[in-house]
Image: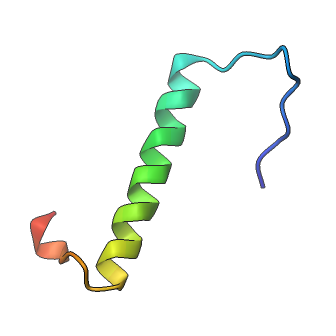
Amino acid sequence: MAEKLDQNQMLSFEELLWANIYQTDALVQLLIEKDIITDLLW
């Protein structure tokens, strides 16, 4: 589970990049599971 950040705490570019990668991968996996896209595209 994600940690709650202090309002004044900033994330590094690398942390934001990894969060985006994980989110995009989860979305792609969901679309593949729902047969909206096929894994042949990847």
Q: In this view, does 13 lie to the left or right of 5?
A: left
Residue at figure coordinates x 34%, y 85% from the top left: 34
Judge whether 36 appears above or below 15 on screen.
Answer: below
Query: Which quarter of the figure is the N terminus placed in?
Result: bottom right
In the picture shown, does residue 19 fall above or below 5? below
Where residue 38 appears, x then y in whole percent?
Answer: 18, 78
Residue 39 quadrant: bottom left
Judged left or right of residue 26, residue 12 is: right
**Could you say where residue 32 lies in the image, as x and y percent from the top left?**
30, 77
Q: Is residue 10 above or below residue 40?
A: above
Residue 11 picture location, percent across and down: 66, 20
Along the viewing direction, whichever of 19 and 31 lies nearer the viewer: 31
The colour scheme is rainbow
Note whether 5 is above or below 28 in the view shown: above
Q: In this view, does 31 lie to the left or right of 36?
A: right
- Percent across and percent down for residue 29 are 38, 70
Q: Which residue is drawn at 83% across and 30% down?
A: 5
Residue that appears at 51% across and 23% down: 14
User: Which residue in the rendered view is the most extreme toward the left?
Assistant: 40
